[in-house]
Image (cartoon, coloured by chain):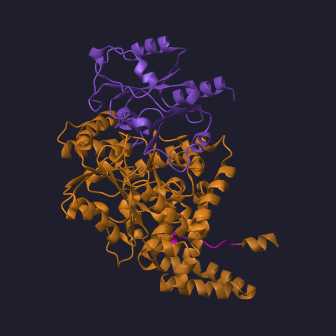
């Protein structure tokens, strides 16, 4: 990961990504497939009605977030869970590692969680002598490759089957194959041993239900169910904005999340976990710890970017974004890529570090159109760009150019004069600066649009 | 929707996600259906928590108590949801929810009267104190993490048989 005080080198990263043909092909395939599947899945449902309802429910939670978090905490405790509040990443990481250390646990199985990526949990645990086994196939692939997720739903989206085959042959000492079915079977065999011997499991949560203290997990592979029901100890790490008021609110999100993410009507598994194993029950962890991460969200929820916290992490805006489709997730140099990632990263990590990401948008609006909970992403991106300019993070030449253009375009006579000058001097400027940006810009028109229309 | 329409919708939606649903009329047909789906399977885990499970006929030499290493798990599940073709697996009454997850073949028996028409119909019944674990299981375990190529049976069962009675 990049160090915290430096800005993310998005331009450099994206130039590198654009030159990687394997990455380009993998991204084109994956985002194309997801876009079509999502479109099919929402084509014959009252999508607008569902989005509006889901958006309203998320807003209701955000308008009164501390109330719902308190309610969740007291109900989760009533059901037998221990609830820990963590103001920042470090506190969250240390809460998890001390729970494990106190119980002498040296290895955990883990189900995919973006919040755990946000707080860099794995590297912290490993520095503390606790081995982490990622069990989602995509997460497992990138873990043994020593990488980070490039998509919030399909973390290894940037790898093709030959790369996965070579990786398995090297790291797992098996015979090379590029057949996804065989590769999946190899991973299953390795991970099954981990599941049945694990003493602790770590998961995230897709939602947390305030009035019952329930955490909700969506998975397709079944690894989430295994991490949360086989070991005696389960630690769930989630951020506070995941609240929904009641269990009866879940169906509208069940209908939207998988459809928007993978085009499925529902994922293979959806688990509701409420507290610990009770007398007479044979299922459930005997000890459940829930770590509620704030990490700046209590501030965001009271500001002009509140609606970003409506996000349910489906990844639809990534797949729809013309920039993400070209450069993939790693170019963003942050936990969350794509349009939602640009906004969230800027809010979580600050303008100083994240301002180059604000170039990673064409403001085409596709992200806003596909968002299942109506996060106004194009507006938030535009507002952050304004803020970037206000805070002086745009290059000096660009600032001078923009204010010059502002002056000129306010006066029609000066503007027309400028057009004439540009037409006359353009060929000279191009000849004097061979290879410069001017060569890639469109040549000023001989007759302007305005003149043709008048 | 009539009860019959709800059952048919559930069967249709379960089949759409690669589960193998069948419908039987009585206990006798249920036991025959089990013989069919379990052909060649030698280690069957079948709890005896519900009355229907207690009545299931599986020869003793095919039974095992070790659900971790069983070849199949036969159980009656709490219910189902027609809208999504999902089974409802619940820890209520001492059921071992993970027993349906570990063996490569899950055989779920659903009583027709326990099929809910929609997600809302089921979730509105849960109230504020649901059991420790409620899992909706929809089709077999799947992944598409390698080039989005669909692969069935990654960590959970690769085969899901459903018998509606």
- Single out the residue that lies furthest toward the front: A279
For image coordinates 44% across by 72% down, the residue present is A348
Q: Position of residue A304 (x, y in %)?
A: 59, 75
Asked if residue A179 lies in the magenta stretch, the reply is no
Near-viewer residue (A451 or A17): A17
Quadrant that contains the C terminus of chain A:
bottom right
Q: Main secondary structure of the magenta part?
A: loop
Quadrant that contains the N terminus of chain A:
bottom left
Asked if residue A439 lies in the magenta stretch, the reply is yes
Q: Is residue B15 above or below residue A206?
A: above
Q: Position of residue A250 (x, y in %)?
A: 56, 49
Near-viewer residue (A28 or B121): B121
In the picture, one chain is orange; tell me its letter.
A
Q: Which residues are magenta?
A: A438-446
For image coordinates 19% across by 43% down, the residue present is A172
Q: Report if residue B4 is visible in the image.
A: yes
User: Which shade of the palette goes to chain B?
Assistant: purple
């Amino acid at each position: 990961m990049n160090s915290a005080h430096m800005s993310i080198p998005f331009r450099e990263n994206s130039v590198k990504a654009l030159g990687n043909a394997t990455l380009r092909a993998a991204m084109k395939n994956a985002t194309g497939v997801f876009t079509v599947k999502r479109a099919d899945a929402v084509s014959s449902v009252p999508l607008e009605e569902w989005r509006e309802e889901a958006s309203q429910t998320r807003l209701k939670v955000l308008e009164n977030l501390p109330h719902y978090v308190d309610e969740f905490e007291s109900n989760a405790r009533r059901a037998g869970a221990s609830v820990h509040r963590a103001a920042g990443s470090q506190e969250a990481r240390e809460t998890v590692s001390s729970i494990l250390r106190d119980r002498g646990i040296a290895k955990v199985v883990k189900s995919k969680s973006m919040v755990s990526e946000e707080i860099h949990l794995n590297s912290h645990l490993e520095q503390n002598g606790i081995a982490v086994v990622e069990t989602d196939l995509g997460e497992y692939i990138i873990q043994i490759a020593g990488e980070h997720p490039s998509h919030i739903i399909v973390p290894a989206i940037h790898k093709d089957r030959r790369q996965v085959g070579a990786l398995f042959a090297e790291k797992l000492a098996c015979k090379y194959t590029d057949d996804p079915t065989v590769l999946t079977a190899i991973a299953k065999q390795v991970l099954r041993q981990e599941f049945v011997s694990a003493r602790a499991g770590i998961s995230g949560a897709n939602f947390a239900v305030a009035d019952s203290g329930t955490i909700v997990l969506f998975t397709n592979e079944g690894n989430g169910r295994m991490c949360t029901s086989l070991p005696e100890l389960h630690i769930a790490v989630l951020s506070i904005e995941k609240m929904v008021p009641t269990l009866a609110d879940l169906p509208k999100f069940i209908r939207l999340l998988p459809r928007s993410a993978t085009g499925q009507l529902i994922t293979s598994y959806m688990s509701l976990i409420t507290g610990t194993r009770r007398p007479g029950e044979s299922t459930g962890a005997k000890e459940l710890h829930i770590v509620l991460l704030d990490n700046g969200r209590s501030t965001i929820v009271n500001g002009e970017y509140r609606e970003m916290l409506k996000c349910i992490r489906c990844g639809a805006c990534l797949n729809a974004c013309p920039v993400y489709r070209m450069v993939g997730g790693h170019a963003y140099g942050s936990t969350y890529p794509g349009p939602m990632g640009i906004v969230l990263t800027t809010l979580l990590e600050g303008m100083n570090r994240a301002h180059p990401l604000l170039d990673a948008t064409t403001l085409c609006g596709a992200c806003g159109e596909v968002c299942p909970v109506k996060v106004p992403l194009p507006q938030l991106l535009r507002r952050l760009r304004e803020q970037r300019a206000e805070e002086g993070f745009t290059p000096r030449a660009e600032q001078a150019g923009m204010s010059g253009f502002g002056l000129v375009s306010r006066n029609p006579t000066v503007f027309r004069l400028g057009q004439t000058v540009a037409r006359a001097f353009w060929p000279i400027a191009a000849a004097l600066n061979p290879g410069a940006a001017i060569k890639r810009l469109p040549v000023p028109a001989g007759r302007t649009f305005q003149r043709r229309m008048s | 929707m009539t009860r019959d329409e709800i059952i048919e919708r559930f069967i249709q939606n379960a089949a759409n996600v690669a589960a193998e649903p069948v419908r039987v009329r009585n206990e006798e047909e249920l036991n025959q259906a089990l013989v069919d789906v379990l052909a060649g399977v030698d280690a069957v885990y079948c709890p005896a928590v519900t009355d229907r499970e207690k009545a299931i006929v599986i020869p003793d030499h095919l039974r095992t108590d070790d659900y971790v290493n069983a070849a199949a798990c036969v159980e009656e599940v709490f219910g189902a949801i027609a809208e999504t073709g999902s089974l409802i697996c619940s820890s209520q009454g001492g059921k071992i929810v993970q027993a349906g997850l570990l063996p490569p073949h899950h055989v779920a028996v659903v009583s027709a009267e326990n099929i809910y028409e929609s997600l809302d119909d089921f979730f509105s019944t849960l109230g504020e104190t649901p059991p420790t674990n409620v899992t909706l299981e929809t089709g077999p375990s799947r992944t598409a993490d390698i080039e989005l190529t669909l692969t069935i049976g990654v960590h959970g069962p690769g085969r899901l048989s459903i018998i509606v009675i």
